[in-house]
Image: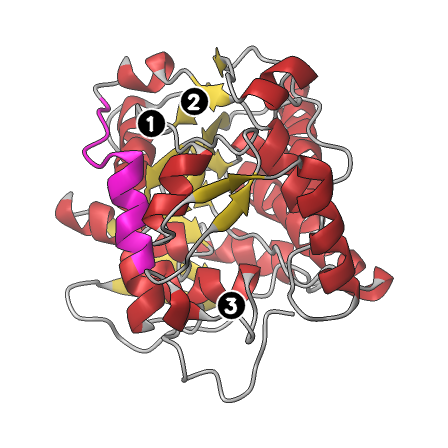
Amino acid sequence: MAPPRRVLVTGATGNVGSALLRRLAREGVAVSGVARRVPPPQPGVDVRWHGIDLTAGWATGALREAMDDVDAVVHLAWRIQPSRTPAARAVMRTTNVEGTRAVVTAAVEAGVPHLVHASSVGVYAPVPQEAQRTGRKPSVDESWPRSGVETSPYSRDKVAAEDLLDEVERSGTGTALARVRPGLVLQRAAGSEIARYFGGPLLPVGLLGRLPLLPLPDAFVAPVVHADDLADGFWRVLAAGGTGAFNAAAADGLGPDEIAAGLGARRRVRAPVSLLRRAAEVSWHARLQPTDPGWVDLGAGAPLMDCSRLRGLGWEPQVSATAALADLVSGMRSGAGGGTPALAPRGLLHGRRAA
């Protein structure tokens, strides 16, 4: 399969999408972008935009028209907030699972040769309790059980989306399917977005770099990838016509000591996962912050990842996990953003909140 020259990207205005647009521009690829909120023109990025809400009843037909004559589709669109109420959770599920169904159905009906779906380390089953207790997590390949973390809505939706891809693969369509499973995706331009999603308006970003201590469990060892490296991974899969699953993470994982240092804490204090989870649960229900406690379970249980399969396509991450965290933190402290509504810098949301 020759490298694609015309690619459609859903969720093209977000953390991963913005980096992928930069990568595709370097390859001279003609890009169509799909987003709920079409952004203003961005310097150096030539995109034909389609304003499509994946939860709309007309989404599949609109997507099918937008996919006319493209060589590949990259599906990045995803919602991680809000999840506090049953109604909000239903909207989140509709976007993530039924939205994925609409994208895949449209791609098959339009005869698109190749579709690459953005999955996550969140699809993997938790590592054993002993590995969580000690922080010595295994580095797993793509065959690790894909049952997810039951208490995490994000994880459950990622598993359901991959189950949907499995159904389509079994049906024997003419569309080749791939799924890329990244760790935490970080970059400076996503600093304000990530602060909104996981800290909310009360997050004291001014304290970053001045924290006397930070309580974190030994289990918080996480795979991380810089957005630009992940974008290159997507391009490698597209160029090779790759199918199946591909892990994507920097060679070094982020442990609790590295996380604390990266956030500017003078020292890290060991704390049990149960204590951190309880704090997240209470503050979430009290609407003090938007991060549901399932994210704590996901952080504790997620494995590290063996990325040999993606490296087999010539991929090699250029940014270490610690450097990616430093890049993100610099964006959080400065209130940095990108040129899209999803990546709005701090202070430009006019009262909107992720919570």
Q: CA distance from mark 2 to mark 1?
A: 9 Å
Cα distance between the residues tagged 3 and 2: 29 Å
Decide if residue 309 is on the left or right side of residue 281. left
Image height of 95 relative to 307, above or below:
below
Amino acid carrying label 2: it is: Phe
Q: Disc 2 or 1, which lies upstream in sequence?
A: 1
Front residue (pair 19, 101): 19
x and y, in percent, of residue 269 in the image: 51, 41
Q: Earlier in the sequence, mark 3 or mark 1?
A: 3
Give the foreground label among 2 and 1.
2
| Amino acid at the residue labelled 1 | Val
Residue 218: name its quadrant: top right
Q: CA distance from mark 3 to mark 1?
A: 31 Å
Task: Bin the neighbour count of mark 2 within 10 Å (Cα to Cα): few under 14, some 14-19, many 20 and up.
Answer: many
Q: Which residues are magenta?
A: 315-329
Q: Quadrant of the N terminus?
A: top left
Residue reaching furthest to the right: 86
* Residue on which disc 2 sits: 246
Would you place residue 300 above or below residue 216 in this image?
above
Identify residue for label 3. 196
